[in-house]
Amino acid sequence: MESALGCDDEGEEKQQMSKSDLIIRIAGEGGEGIISAGDMITQACARAGLDVYTFKTFPAEIKGGYAMYQVRASGQRLFNQGDTFDVLCAFNGEAYDLNHARLKSGTALVYDSPGGDFEPDIPEGVFAYPIPMTATAKELKSPKAKNMVALGALSQLFAIPEVSLREVIGAKFGRKGEAVVQANLAAFARGRELAAALTKTDPFAVGQAVEKRDVVVMSGNHAIGLGALIAGLDFYSAYPITPATEIAQYVAKHLPKRAGTLIQAEDEIASIAQVVGASYAGKKSMTATSGPGLSLMSEMLGMAFMSETPCVVVDVQRGGPSTGLPTKHEQSDLFLAIHGTHGDAGRIVLSVENVRDCVDLTVQAFNLAEKYQVPVLLLSDGSLAFSTQTIPYPDPDSYTLVERKRWDGEGEYKRYQLTADGISPMADPGTHGATHIATGLEHNELGMPNYTPANHEAMQDKRFRKLMTVAADMPPAEVDAGAEEDMADIGVIAWGSTIGVVREALQRLRAAGIQAKGFYPKLLWPLPAEQFEAFGAGCRRLLLPEVNFQGQLAHFVRAETSLRPESYTICGGLPFTPDMIVTKVKEMLA
Ligand code: COA
């Protein structure tokens, strides 16, 4: 079955409509301002105190191709983008055609007519609102403002707060000049008038939160940038690649304010080399990339492990292999993240579930890198990178920061001293009495090249010994047991942003009387095998959904534990939806 976020899915019935959990999808062509309009709805809903969770997909081309922005807004806590829309706003015929299968009775359609490029055959039971978006924008002599006409109509029809939207329009287009702001406000107002002239027949309206909370709306990419700043980032070497570039853009804006340095390197190989070099020089360092860039970094990641140099590498996974699907979602870099380098080399691999995690686990990644003097890879993904979510305001003072173990100046300095826990003191270059070599060649305790069998074995043992306590340094993987205390009918293991989808699916399964538990590891390597085993022991059947072809985490679980989860994989460039997990579990248990 295709994901319900896709467009040719004949699958599930739409969830029961609910005014307190509304999903609006805007769809059209890249370059028509779909993203801007979606962002504005998101901001307005968040200002109303609602939880928001967005999903967007757009083509790899700068202009043209199908673009879509989905906003889910609710008075309840949200964990994912939802199954499908309640309201579709179609900017053109292609967007309408691609979403037609999901326009079920009870959904609402706002579309460009008259004057658009299509005239829909409205399915029975769909609440339809024709709004002349293109024609009105032309009439107002601001063709770019078609999206604002649509936004005005959506605001009027579904009670998206007008005042907030007007403020957001001013803020968004302010840098383009007052004339642009005024033209857009005029288009917005006209859109509201056009919609007000129609008779509202649907039951949908954006709600108001009961209580105001201290929250902020951020994208996954920006949250990783924020997490790095909180962790004490000194140096960032950037090489742009979709969908990771925004991390560098965020850091570039804020890092110089605290005398940190961001450099744009000539490629990913240079960028990881600069990170390793800067960390060797004593600076907390990172880079962020996507699959193709991580492939290029493989050799230097081995060098970082061998030279015991802390570094953080964020991999915002996208559809592969090769250049693949640059703007689409996938969880397919786990093999590369865990084992992607030559020789026997180790590393720590973490993965984030949501935007909140993007802050917290980035701090954690730095702490682990500094403590264990190893590369730490933080896996995000394409849907999370661009997803904006409401998160509690992150308080920088609430995080514990770990600094690397440094030489105390006593005795002979041995950079690679064989210690009980494998961790040896570091010394910044130039430290009196601590001259040493850090090298990719095998070396002795002083860092001098040494290829004897006994030395290589002792040093490999030291480097891998460090990793044995990592699991104990992280909070244990969350077990989502609901009210289940006994053996569950089904246990679902999930990683990355699939976790949020599973959370909601389990709630629905429990409501349907199925005993279901979830297991959500954030540390993927070294795999916390004992925690997996303990979870598996409490479930009759196990399911492991992931967005890749080969079932990559399932592969590691089978290799490292006695568990044999059923692998459920999709790779259509879109995330799972809760109804897909619910359907799969019901099939398994039938
Ligand atoms: N009035 C004036 N300007 C407007 C406007 C309006 N009513 N509505 C939108 N715009 C501007 C936006 O401000 C933005 O300009 P900016 O770039 O100066 O900020 C621009 O028009 C595009 O609008 P936006 O809403 O951001 O995007 P879109 O929905 O039109 O979609 C993209 C276009 C962003 C998806 C597309 O251009 C893109 O970047 N695709 C991805 C490319 C990529 O990463 N490829 C991978 C390579 S490996």
Image (cartoon, helix red, strand yellow):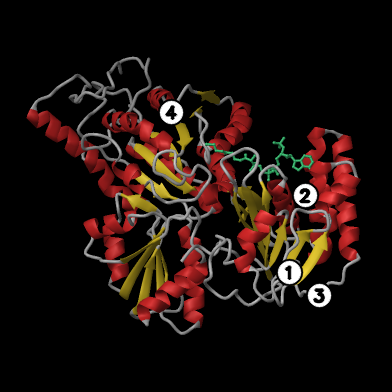
Q: Earlier in the sequence, mark 2 or mark 1?
A: 2
Pointer 2 residue Cβ closer than 8 Å to ligand 1 = yes
Q: Nearer the viewer, mark 3 or mark 1?
A: 3
Q: Position of residue 215 (x, y in %)?
A: 66, 54
Question: In front here: 131 or 50?
Answer: 131
Q: Quadrant of residue 568?
A: bottom left
Q: Nearer the viewer, mark 2 or mark 1?
A: 2
Give the amino acid type for the residue marked by disc 2 in the picture.
Asn
Structural crowding at the residue carrying mark 2, measured as other residues with C-alpha within 10 Å and reported as few (<14), some (14–19) or many (≥20): many
Label 2, label 3: how far apart the Cα atoms are: 23 Å
Question: What residue is rendered at 46% in x and 85% in y?
Answer: 513
The disc at residue 147 is: 2
Q: Is 546 left or right of 89, judged from the image as shown?
A: left
Label 1, label 4: how far apart the Cα atoms are: 47 Å
Give the amino acid type for the residue marked by disc 3 in the picture.
Thr
Tell me the SS state at disc 1: loop
Pointer 1 residue Cβ closer than 8 Å to ligand 1 = no
Give the amino acid type for the residue marked by disc 4 in the picture.
Glu
Q: Earlier in the sequence, mark 2 or mark 3?
A: 2
Label 4, label 3: how far apart the Cα atoms are: 54 Å
Q: Which residue is mark 4?
A: 268
Structural crowding at the residue carrying mark 3, measured as other residues with C-alpha within 10 Å and reported as few (<14), some (14–19) or many (≥20): few
Ligand 1: image quarter: top right
Evaluate if marks 3 and 1 touch, with contact meaning CB atoms under 8 Å apart: no
Tell me the SS state at disc 2: helix
